[in-house]
Image (spheres, helix red, strand yellow):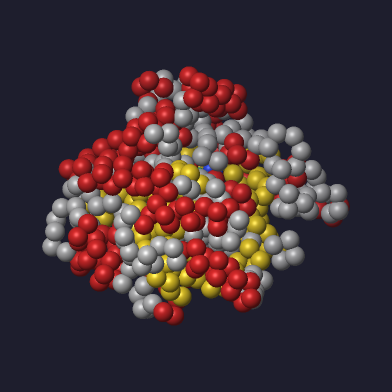
Amino acid sequence: MSSLPSRPAGSAPLALPPGVDLETFNKFIQDVTDVVGAENVEVIVSMNQIDDKSYEDPTHTHDPHHIVDQDYFMASAVVAPRNVADVQAIVGLANPLSMPLWPISIGRNSGYGGAGPRVRGSLVLNMGKNMNKILEVNVEGAYCLVEPGVTFQDMHNYLVENNLRDKLWIDVPDLGGGSILGNTLERGVGYTPYGDHFMMHSGMEVVLPNGELIRTGMGALPDPRKPATMGLKPEDQPWNSSAQLFPYGFGPYVDGLFTQSNLGIVTKMGMWLFPNPGGYQSYLITLPKDDDLKQAVDIIRPLRLAMVLQNVPTIRHILMDAAVMGTKTDYTDTKGVLGDEELDAIAKKLNLGRWNFYGALYGPEPVRNALWAAIKGSFSAIPGAKFYFKDDVPENSVLRIRDLTMQGIPTFEELRWVSWLPNGAHLFFSPIAPVQGEDAVAQYEVTRRRCEEAQLDFIGTFTIGMREMHHIVCIVFNKRDEDQKRRAHWLIRTLIDDCARRGWGEYRTHLAVMDQIMGTYNWNNGSFLRFNEVIKNAVDPNGIMAPGKSGVWPKNYKKEEWTL
Ligand code: ADP
C-alpha cells in the first residue's frame, strides 16, 4: 500500500469539499493514493502551495487570473490518473461520498478560470500529466487520435519531427500551450480553415459518472478487422476505422453533451488535421478610422460565406496589437482610459489602422492570386485601407505572429497583451454577433463604453466564423489592485446583462459568471437549463462531476445557495 503524500499529520486541506469531513476526506485521499500512487496526489494544505505561477508552468490548484479571492476557486487536492482504469476507480470512490471532481487536461484555460474548480474543495483531476500520448497520426485520413495531455505545440512538433508538415497541419489557437482535447471541449477556436475545433473533432472516448466507458459516433461500432487484439481492455482496443472520419455514427449525436458540460471525463479524442494546401500567404489590411468597422464587417460577410475568405480571420482593435508590441507605459503617461486622439497616435506610431484585419490565402499561387484580387478589390472600397504581406512589415509586427498562427504553427507572443498593465491578469468576455456591420458597431459601442466606465481600456477582436463572429473582449486588470479587480468583475457582470438585453449571448465564460450567463439563456421559462438538469441528474445522480459547470447544478446542491 502506498503512503499518503507528505503533509503534517492531521493537517486539513485549505478547502474541504462541501459536506465532507476531514476524516472522510483523508480516507478518500488514502484510497485514491492507493490507486494512482503518492507521486500523483497533491493535497493543498498551505497557501505556500497556491502560486499563480506562469503560462509556461501553469498551476493546477486555482485560477491564476483570480477575479475574486485567489483561494476562492480552489482545489482540495490535485490527482493525476495514469490511465482509464485509474479514472474509473476514482469515479467509483467518489460516488458514495458525492465527492466533486473537476477534470482538466492541461489546466491553462486562460481567462476562463484556469484549472480552478467551480466548487471550492473539488478534487482537480489532472488528466494531462500522465495521459499525454499521441495515439495515432493517420496521413491518408488526415486525422490524429490524442489523449488529454497532448498540446497543440506537441502535435505541431510531432508533425515537424516526422517530416509530415508538408502533408498535414494542426489548427492552433492564439497560444500553443493548451490541450487539443480541453480546447475542443470548451469549443475553442483557431485560425486556419479548420478553426472551429469542435466541428473538426471526430470520436470521443468518455468515462461516465457511473464509471462506464463509451466511444461516440462510429467508435461505438466494434472494429472487426483486428482479431489479434482480442483480450485487450476496451480502452486499449483499436477504434473502428471510420471513427475519426465520420463524427456522427448512428442514433443521437451525443458528443456535444461532453462539451462545456459536466457529464463525463474524456480520455481520448480524434481530431482532423488540415492537409497542407500547397501554398500559403498571410496578409494584413489596415483600416484607418474607428468607424470603418461597420463597412469592413459588411464586406467580410459575403466573402466569408462564399469561402473566398478561407480561414477564420480576425479584425483586431488597435490596442490589441499595441498591447502585443508594448505595455501601456511604452505609449503614454496617461493613467486613465485612452481616448480617440491617443488611439489615433498609437495607430500612427505603429503604422496600423484603428482596426486591423488579419487573414490568409491557401492553395497554389493562381488560386491565391484570384482570391486576393477579390478580397483586395472588396476592401479597396474603404478609403485609406492599406494592404500588406508579411515581408512588407517590420520584424516585431503582429502580422509576423499571425503569419505563423494562420498556418498552424503555435506561438506564444500573444501572451504579451496581458502585460498591458502591471501585474496583468485577464478575463475574457466573449459574446457572439451576426457578421453584420450594425451589430459589430453596436457591440463595440456597448463594450467600449462600459470598459470606459470601469476605467479599463477596451482591448478586443472579432473572430470571424462561418456565419457569426466571436467578439473577444480582453479585460486586462492589475490583480494586485483590489479596486481594479472589483471594477473588472463589475464590468463583465454588467456587460452580460447589457448584451442579453440586446439578444447577444456569450459562447464560453469564466467560472465566476457561468450561473449568470446560463440565466440569460432562458427562452421559454428556462426550458434549456431544465432539460440539462434532467440529463445531469440522470447521468450523474450523486453530482460528482464538475458540479456547477456552465451553471448546471446537480440536485444534491441547493442551487439558490450555490449560484453566484
Ligand atoms: P487547456 O488545455 O486549454 O489548458 P483545460 O485543460 O483547462 O484547457 O480544459 C478546459 C476545460 O475543459 C476544463 O475546465 C474542463 O471543464 C474541460 N475539460 C478539460 N479536459 C477534460 C477532460 N479530459 N474531460 C472532461 N472535461 C475536460
Please tell me whether residue 252 is drawn above or below residue 351 in the rendered image: above
Q: Position of residue 451 (x, y in %)?
A: 25, 45
**Residue 90 can be seen, yes or no:** yes
Q: Position of residue 555 (x, y in %)?
A: 49, 20
Q: Residue at x 52, y 58 (%)?
A: 312
The answer to which of 482 and 251 lies nearer the viewer is: 251
The answer to which of 238 and 37 lies nearer the viewer is: 238
Q: Position of residue 214 (x, y in %)?
A: 69, 39
Q: Quadrant of the C terminus?
A: top left
**Residue 120 can be seen, yes or no:** no
Q: Position of residue 15 (x, y in %)?
A: 34, 35
Q: In this view, does 541 lie to the left or right of 39?
A: right
Q: Residue at x 73, y 49 (%)?
A: 246
Q: Which residue is drawn at 65% across and 46% down?
A: 204
Q: Which residue is drawn at 71% across and 53% down?
A: 244
| Number of numbered discs on residues | 0
Quadrant for residue 55, please give it: bottom left
